[in-house]
Image (cartoon, rainbow, N blue to C red):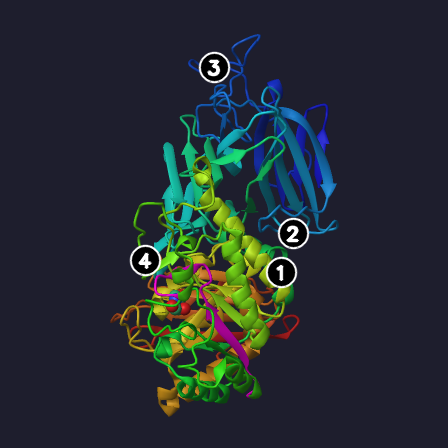
Amino acid sequence: MILFKPETQVFHISNKYISYIMEIEEGGYLAHLYFGKKVNDYSGNFKYPRMDRSFSPNLPNAKDRLFSLDTLMMEYPGNGFGDFRESAYNLKHGDGSTITDFRYKSHRIQKGKEKLFGLPATYGNEEEAETLVIQLEDKEKGLLLELSYTIFQEYAALTKSARIINNGETKTKIKKLASQSIDFPNQDLDLLHLNGTWGRECQIVREKIEYGTKVLDSKRGSSSHQQNPCLILAQPQTTEFQGEAFSFCLIYSGNHEMVIQKDPYKQTRIIMGINSFNFDWQLNPNEMFQTPEVVLSYSSSGLNKLSAVTHDFFNYHLIRGDFKGKERPTLINNWEATYFDFDEEKLLNIIDEAKDLGIEMFVLDDGWFGKRENDDSSLGDWFENRGKIKNGLSQLANQVHSRGMKFGIWYEPEMISEDSNLFRQHPDWALSVPGRERSPSRSQYVLDFSRKDVRENIYRQMKELLNEVEIDYIKWDLNRNMTDVYSAILPSDQQGEVFHRYILGLYEFLENLVEEFPNILFESCSGGGGRFDAGMLYYMPQTWTSDNTDAIARLKIQYGTSMIYPISSMGAHVSAVPNHQTGRNTSMDIRGNAAMAGVFGYELDITQLKEEEKKEIKEQVAFYKEHRRLMQFGRFIRLRSPFEENDVAWMFVAEDQSEAMVFYYRVLAEASYPLVHLQLSGLKEEWIYESEEMTAAGDELMNLGFYIDPNLFGDYATKRFYFKRISPCLE
Ligand code: DGJ
């Protein structure tokens, strides 16, 4: 899969879908040549043309003026020798200089993929993956830069990361070290990214890339509701079903930075990595700094195909542990049912009702610990609140288990309330700048997870409870972003490390936790999708997609999230009406149909429902359980976008194409509504499929399609169609 041709000095990384090509250029600089659809054998003809351009500096000792880094397509650009565009790195050396000159030194090609030190990353064994490590060095400073590329046999995807090793004699400050950089040659490209805020995550923004520099980032200490750490480049004509598209997804949960730069020659550069804002890292002699990894995926047939690549890749080469590829339980969560106002009796009533409805797991959300009666107190005091659960959590867990259900619980381990025993004992454990007052958010502060002693305390508290109470699932929440970022234990000249050290500390904590408690299913959450990223997915196979449970709002949120993240990772619940976030009234039917396009659950007081509603829920649960493999792990295909239309549709197709589930949602009703027909996708043309409503061959369903009942009446209408193959070929 990886070839190096000494005659042309070209690296060609490829599999049956994609090629990624680089060349060692004049002076030993590493140039980027190509990323896209597979080419069998690269001839060497795409060498960057030579020409004299004014104001484009040449290399030291250049024989002519024809070669400059100013316009060259670079693989990991630095600034200082003529490339004035955005840099992938910025290092400040002991002598105060900021010029670093990385030139090719050597490379190695190895089977499989090594773990990334201290960071989440994709994985693959020796049969599945191959890795190229290119070493570049700055001889003057004794710095070694290693760029890693791993290609996987079965995916139109590759991963990239970088690391620096200080073999010199003096320390260097890393002010920026991107995970990856790539240049695209002159062409028009669109940028798609996932922007949003609390309750409105992952809204797709599509725009033409214009000249100049655009930065999409998070400075919040987490990957954020505001800007998901991924982006897509597409040709202007690319749709869900055709055209080229490239995705870039950073496997990191902290501050990130994505720079999109189009130079005057229409070349587009994409740089991604840890945010360089408020970041620096002291690299002493003999130390190494490893960047997070980026996953690059490619599709020559539209955005749906592109998403399918990352969905499968994340399901099988990022998500780990007992729940990898496994069907996830249906659940009931008491948050929107009770908020903080619950006691054992109330919970048991919900649990009993849930059991009758066929729900498989009960999740006890916020409020079970310390003396937490509202969100003002007790974070950090992870012992049970007997005032609320009089017979104790263990008993409650037993009660749940005795009903044949699983038991889950909520935690927010990275946080501390001022009103907590932990804060009274260790006020310095919260992030804060000496002499300044801290800024509360939701009345809470952030624990300094860069500190081992802090992590050990929280780990010990969690472990005690997990050893005592039989817990099957944990929802790991994070309900504020970081301010007052300063660590009491780091020297003043290393405070720029705190953001990243925090994330490394978090990852270390999570690694220990999932290793020690492999049977627990984890769902990450940050007020919904505030930390929905590939870094968290490495430890926790699910994420609570949004605190917004409104079915109509969820159409956009889930559609946007699905651009990159697999359906098996997206928590989605049916909640009460009027909806608690939007005040909207929708039917149980559409709430069910929206939530079924995710890991399905309920979050409302089911004891208060009418009998017909309970009947509907029972049917939904049974239906979802019967078909969940298809919805959680089938191929997800977006048919009609809520960002573009009033009619929204998506579908799931089984891997063997023998069945499919189609969901249609109409947002608002209108008189004399135009007829809507759905053309399906992903089926076998010659197979006959049957649903309750029709029997037709795959090619008919895909090319002609079928009409949605024109008599659908009212706002927020929905339909669901389940197709099963009934014969192998046309009779
Ligand atoms: C925010 C989460 O997203 C909610 O689902 C809920 O768990 C609350 N936190 C609890 O405080």
**Element on which disc 1 rests:** loop
Q: Nearer the viewer, residue 684 or 179?
A: 179
| Amino acid marked by disc 3 | Pro
Residue of label 3: 57
Mark 1 or mark 2, earlier in chain: 2
Residue of label 1: 320
In the rendered image, residue 664, in percent from the top left (x then y), is placed at: 41, 70
Q: Magenta stretch?
A: 403-420
Cβ–Cβ below 8 Å for labels 3 and 2? no
Nearest-to-viewer mark from 4 and 1: 4
In the rendered image, residue 175, in percent from the top left (x then y), is placed at: 47, 33
Mark 3 or mark 2, earlier in chain: 3
Residue of label 2: 123
| Amino acid marked by disc 2 | Tyr
Cβ–Cβ below 8 Å for labels 1 and 2? yes
Instruction: Categorize mark 4 by other alpha carbons within 10 Å: few (<14), some (14-19), many (20+).
Output: few
Whether residue 110 sits left or right of residue 336 in the image: it is: right
Q: Is residue 653 above or below residue 503?
A: below
How far apart marks 4 and 3 lie (CA) works out to: 50 Å
Q: From this viewpoint, is residue 232 visible? A: no
Q: Would you say residue 457 sits in the magenta stretch?
A: no
Q: Is residue 444 above or below residue 367?
A: above
How far apart marks 1 and 2 lie (CA) works out to: 9 Å
Whether residue 665 sits left or right of residue 731 in the image: it is: left
Residue of label 4: 441
